Amino acid sequence: MTGAAGMIGRKLTARLVKDGKLNGESVDALTLTDVVAPEKPAGFKGTVATKTADLAGPGIAKELLEKRPDVIFHLAGVVSGEAETDFDKGYHVNLDGTRALLEAVRRQHQVDGYKPKFVFTSSIAVYGTPFPDDGIPDDFHLTPLTSYGTQKAMSELLLADYTRRGFLDGVGIRLPTICVRPGKPNKAASGFFSGIIREPLAGIEAVLPVADTVRHTHASPRAAVGFLIHAAGLTREQLGPRVSLAMPGVCCTVAEQIDSLKRIAGDKVAARIKRGPDPLVVRIVAGWSERINAERAKKLGFKAETSFDEIVKAHIEDELGGKIPA
Amino acid sequence: MTGAAGMIGRKLTARLVKDGKLNGESVDALTLTDVVAPEKPAGFKGTVATKTADLAGPGIAKELLEKRPDVIFHLAGVVSGEAETDFDKGYHVNLDGTRALLEAVRRQHQVDGYKPKFVFTSSIAVYGTPFPDDGIPDDFHLTPLTSYGTQKAMSELLLADYTRRGFLDGVGIRLPTICVRPGKPNKAASGFFSGIIREPLAGIEAVLPVADTVRHTHASPRAAVGFLIHAAGLTREQLGPRVSLAMPGVCCTVAEQIDSLKRIAGDKVAARIKRGPDPLVVRIVAGWSERINAERAKKLGFKAETSFDEIVKAHIEDELGGKIPA
């Protein structure tokens, strides 16, 4: 697992340890890597190898394959805001890192026929405006309007080609915005979607940098982990040649998010959201998709929440011990 | 101009020298590069620099920009058949070479604001089956089924991002199959489309590796040069954020190609076409688009032939001195 020290990485690790199984087989060994040290998970009976490294660095990807993992979860990536402000870093991590990992698998495949399942986290940022009014269909073309979206779309193309050539068995899942992200804000331009729920629930103010008419599609961290596990179990036949697909989520406006927070935690909590327009965030978000139809993913059994209330409740259950702070 | 020693490169050079102007300005200097030595064009009054090099090699792209060309024609590439049989070479030339050139422009832009027009030759191989029955629309998604198509689609994504960021002014033209290619067969899987016209006209046998029901879209080398010149003159406003687009061409079956040859050169010439199925070519061609609508290109003023007869006649005029050999 790359990006193992990140929020989704830690939750996926915890889920794998808790389940003890993946695709019906026991999880015996984990190789966890990130640019910051991944924690060894508590209570895991198998072996764990951790590596703090730049995936695009020479020899790193090869080293990570030493134990020939049956499933690779490639989560590592620089987030959208940072990929936009640091052009070089975005391409280095999001494109070169992905390519280095794919190449290491191919080289190994040529040596011993190694052919893992390769689960790649892509993003709905691969889509760019203008969008159809009735939502983005599964065959919508990829016209990213950010460097982040470009890097994800390029990685999807590589993944499809490496899969077609038989070097690995790839699946790319285009995550909607993950909400509510726990912990501190990150550099993602989408960070405020979580901040306006998380911070008020923690008793502190949150800044809303866009208009509350902004519509977007969200899934909880719990749902995202579920997508990854489900993706790992899909067969080559189920996926066909188009190996990357959009994930389902809850489509709602910022105003509807705030309404959910009010319903669940009260007006006093929701009043902690303050307006503070940020032109860079407004510009980036304006190029993002609003509604993702994700028909293919739903047919393939991917499951997300069905209302934003459920997303707020999942956050309270998973991060706040089920209690709404006063 | 990269790929300047190739067939299109030589014809484009000749056209630029003949016209003496591009976008209403005089052509004063040419920088020509390729992996084999480009010829200095006869009769050119301006300065010519030639460079025989691997575009992806260290420092090469930077060196090519020494004279700060106002227009870059990036034609260099490994053809489809070779990109499929030599995976490393295909990615090295078609992806890394393109990226090296784009990066060199970006670095120069950061130094002195250099911002050239960048005309990139993409291909209809960026499309993959299944296709709509009524032809491929301009907003059809890119789902290449070859490594070549993958490399072209990735390069298009880079071109759009570098354009969006303001480093250069990009336009990508998705060429249909160029037919009739003069000279010797190359390693392109599409080579037979030309071979079955060119070889019989030259008095020799040609092998048809696919069924004559195969439908495809073609444009002459003369039309392709016209596309490149026209693309160089398009403005940022005309192109908008979707900088790559499909070019028009003549959509016909192999049988219709052969009928044209019969009409123009007679049954005896057409009888030099022999059947010889090639599974690799059949497989690659089966993943290609048949009909390209190219509405956007037509609206933007790109012009191709309107019948395959015109394509055969263009070949006879441009390559055979206007005479049909006995």
Image: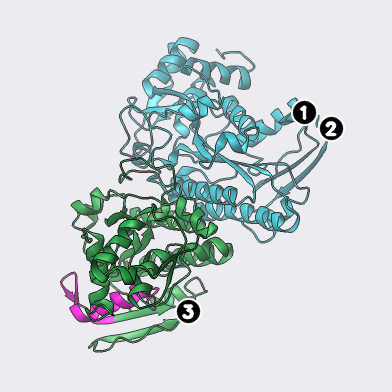
Chain colours: A green, B cyan
Instruction: Find residue A300 and report its horizontal and vertical position in percent.
Output: 20, 54
Which residue position is annotated with label 2?
B45
Q: Which residues are magenta?
A: A1-29
Q: Which mark is residue A313?
A: none
How much space separates mark 2 and mark 1, taking CA atoms? 9 Å
Q: Decide whether residue B94 is among the magenta residues.
A: no
Foreground tag (2 vs 1): 1
Chain identifier of the residue bearing label 1 in the image: B
Which residue position is annotated with label 3?
A53
Is residue A40 or residue B248 the one in the foreground?
A40
Is residue A312 or residue A108 the one in the foreground?
A312
Callout 3: helix, strand or loop? loop
The image quarter in which residue A65 lies: bottom left
Which residue position is annotated with label 1?
B20
Is residue B281 or residue B137 the one in the foreground?
B137
Residue at coordinates 54% horizontally, 56% vertically from top-left? Answer: B92
Chain identifier of the residue bearing label 2 in the image: B
Q: Are marks 3 and 2 on the same chain?
A: no
How much space separates mark 3 and mark 1, taking CA atoms? 54 Å
